Image: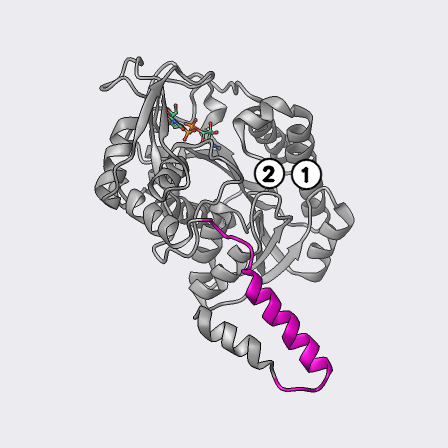
């Protein structure tokens, strides 16, 4: 029996796949690389020294997605795949609704067809909208304020209706607060396309010299230093939360939502300070006006995840910064595509194999030089 991980090449997906493989689960990854790189799959193999099934498939491609269910004995699905940029979702709402919702509908239809009724769904604290109070509990009012958050909210509703229609379903909805950090190896981490929207990858790119300085969006909030407060959670703690949720749904039916956060809030300036301590690098910043749509303070009440999933976050903000910095230092350009000479060597190997010659001396020299 295998665990199907949609979006398994992505930031949170790849970290979760590592923990699944470490626990000897058999996994099948489905990803279309719309917001991830193939190299992350190689890094997963390198870190775990284990292999897994992989299909480069878009969830909207029903025929090819069905092959995954035909060719594998799937026990449960961890569903990460989806567009996730808040600002972008405001610009191209139809793409977000089609990709995230239609993709999930196709996935669920195939799950039902092949009698796979177990799902862990990647949701977000953004479904709480502009919460009036903190800490935030799962029974707080829901109300997303952007198309991205609305897709998460609508999918949560769809999954709820699915369980009402067939009690065989067992679903855990995981509402992430602010995932940051990276695997201790420094081999995998967050690799956003273009200029990062989120705080931590932006700070990391300033520290490594890719970006000039951080813009702090507002210091006039009613907080200890005027800057926004968030619940940052280490991506490895988040990944381990998925394994706890998976174990839970394999033993229980029904549906429930869980906050995955630490319960602690840190301001923007506190995060900058922690990152400077962790990296030894000064982070220049400029204070500018608030970012539209930002809320002043957001952090979780994580008690339900502790009581029902037996999960709590263990890693603190300093470790999150240290692990982020290790990843960024080792990979200043993220999962850059294979270097040209590696591609050239592979080409020469193929040409020489076709001509029946031994491996090319040039490729050997180049490879030796790069190692
Ligand atoms: C954190 C704090 C900013 C960037 C978003 C999504 C949410 C979830 C997590 C997917 C805020 C400040 C940021 C910068 C800054 N994603 N900031 N300068 O907005 O809390 O949540 O990511 O599920 O859906 O909304 O995260 O990292 O963008 O911002 O001052 O360059 O850092 O104002 O106070 P956010 P963030």
Q: 35 or 121: which is nearer to us?
A: 35
Residue extending farthest to the right is 63
Dot 1 surroundings within 10 Å: few (below 14), some, or many (20 or more)?
Answer: some
Q: Earlier in the sequence, mark 2 or mark 1?
A: 2
The quarter in which the C terminus is drawn is: bottom left
Q: Is residue 23 visible?
A: no
**Residue 47, numbered circle:** none
Q: 343 or 40: which is nearer to us?
A: 343
Q: Is residue 303 visible?
A: yes
Q: Quick check: which quadrant has ligand 1? A: top left
- Residue under label 2: 82
The quarter in which the N terminus is drawn is: bottom right
In this view, the mark in front (2 or 1): 2
- Numbered range of the magenta stretch: 333-358
Say which residue appears at 39% left-offset and 43% top-offset. Answer: 309
Compared to 28, does 169 lie above or below?
A: above
**Residue 167, percent from left and from top:** 61, 39
- Asked if labels 1 and 2 touch by Cβ distance under 8 angstroms, the answer is yes
Q: CA distance from mark 2 to mark 1?
A: 8 Å
**Residue 57, percent from left and from top:** 69, 50
Say which residue appears at 38% left-offset and 51% top-offset. Answer: 327
Compared to 232, does 136 lie above or below?
A: above
Compared to 23, does 78 lie above or below?
A: above
Image quadrant assignment for residue 159: top right
**Residue 103, numbered circle:** 1
**Residue 121, percent from left and from top:** 54, 40
Q: Is residue 294 left or right of residue 152?
A: left
- Magenta run includes residue 313: no
Say which residue appears at 46% left-offset and 22% top-offset. Answer: 128
Image quadrant assignment for residue 160: top right
């Amino acid at each position: 029996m295998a665990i199907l991980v949609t979006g398994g090449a992505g930031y949170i997906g790849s970290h979760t796949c590592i923990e699944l493989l470490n626990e000897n689960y058999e996994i099948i990854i489905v990803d279309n690389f719309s917001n991830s790189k193939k190299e992350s799959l190689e890094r997963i193999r390198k870190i775990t020294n284990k292999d897994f099934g992989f299909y480069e498939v878009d969830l909207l491609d029903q025929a090819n997605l069905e092959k995954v269910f035909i060719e594998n004995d799937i026990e449960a699905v961890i569903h990460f795949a989806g567009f996730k940029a808040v600002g972008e979702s405001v610009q191209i709402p139809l793409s977000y609704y089609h990709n995230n919702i239609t993709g999930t509908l196709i996935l669920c239809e195939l799950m039902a067809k092949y009698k796979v009724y177990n799902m862990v769904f990647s949701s977000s604290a953004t479904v709480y909208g502009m919460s009036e109070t903190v800490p935030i509990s799962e029974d707080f009012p829901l109300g997303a304020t952007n198309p991205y958050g609305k897709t998460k909210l609508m999918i949560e509703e769809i999954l709820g209706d699915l369980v009402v229609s067939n009690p065989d379903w067992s679903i855990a909805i995981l509402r992430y607060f602010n995932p940051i950090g990276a695997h201790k190896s420094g081999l995998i981490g967050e690799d956003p396309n273009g200029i990062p929207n989120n705080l931590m990858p932006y700070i990391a790119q300033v520290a490594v010299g890719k970006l000039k300085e951080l813009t702090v969006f507002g210091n006039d909030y009613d907080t200890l230093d005027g800057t926004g407060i968030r619940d940052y959670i280490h991506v490895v703690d988040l990944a381990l939360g998925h394994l706890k949720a998976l174990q839970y749904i394999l033993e229980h039916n029904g549906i429930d939502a869980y906050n995955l956060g630490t319960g602690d809030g840190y301001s923007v300036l506190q995060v900058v300070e922690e990152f400077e301590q962790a990296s030894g690098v000064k982070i220049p910043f400029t204070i500018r006006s608030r970012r539209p749509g930002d809320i002043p303070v957001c952090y979780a009440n994580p008690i339900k995840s502790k009581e029902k999933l037996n999960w709590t976050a263990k890693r603190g903000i300093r470790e999150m910064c240290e692990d982020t910095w290790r990843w960024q230092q080792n990979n200043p350009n993220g999962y850059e595509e294979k270097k040209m000479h590696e591609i050239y060597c592979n080409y020469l190997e193929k040409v020489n194999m076709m001509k029946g010659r031994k491996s090319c001396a040039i490729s050997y020299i180049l490879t030796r030089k790069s190692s």
